[in-house]
Amino acid sequence: MLKILKYLFFTSIGILVLLGFFVVPEHPHFFWEKIPAFDAIFGFLGCIVIVLIAKSLGHYLLEKDEDYYD
């Protein structure tokens, strides 16, 4: 069941990204609104940046040495 849900999820995301290439806003206010599927790409890259920042903060600020409490 989990494999089917994962397959449906990624398939629907792929279809929505492909539809982003065909649907263009009528009056784009900014130049990046003319780029096909910009919102999906921007969201994906933003998510990657947030994860990398969170991992680095956790590694450098929260992680302690093994003998920290000794």
Image (tube, helix red, strand yellow):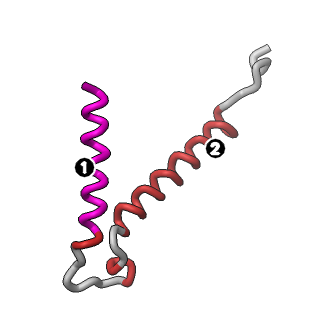
Rate crowding at label 2 as few (under 14), some (14 to 19) or many (20 or more) other CA atoms within 10 Å: few
* Magenta range: 1-20
Query: Mark 1 and mark 2: span between their CA atoms?
Result: 32 Å
Asked which quadrant contains residue 9, the reply is top left
The image shows residue 64, relative to residue 48, as above or below, that is: above
Amino acid identity at mark 1? Ser
Dot 2: element: helix
Q: Looking at the picture, how far across and down is residue 55, in whole percent?
A: 59, 41
For disc 2, the marked residue is: 56
Helix, strand or loop: magenta stretch: helix
Amino acid identity at mark 2? Ser
Whether label 1 touches label 2, CB < 8 Å: no
Asked which quadrant contains residue 21, the reply is bottom left
Q: Looking at the picture, how far across and down is residue 49, in whole percent?
A: 53, 54
Q: Image point 75% across, 17% down: which residue?
A: 69
Q: Image point 66% across, 37% down: which residue?
A: 59
Magenta-colored stretch includes residue 4? yes
For disc 1, the marked residue is: 12
Front in this rendered view, residue 6 or 45:
6
Direction from residue 64 to residue 11 in the image, left or right? left
Magenta-colored stretch includes residue 23? no
Direction from residue 52 to residue 33 in the image, left or right? left
Pair 1/2: label in front: 1
Q: Image point 76% across, 20% down: which residue?
A: 66
Rate crowding at label 1 as few (under 14), some (14 to 19) or many (20 or more) other CA atoms within 10 Å: few
* Quadrant holding the C terminus: top right
In the orientation shown, which residue stands out farthest toward the left? Answer: 26
Dot 1: element: helix
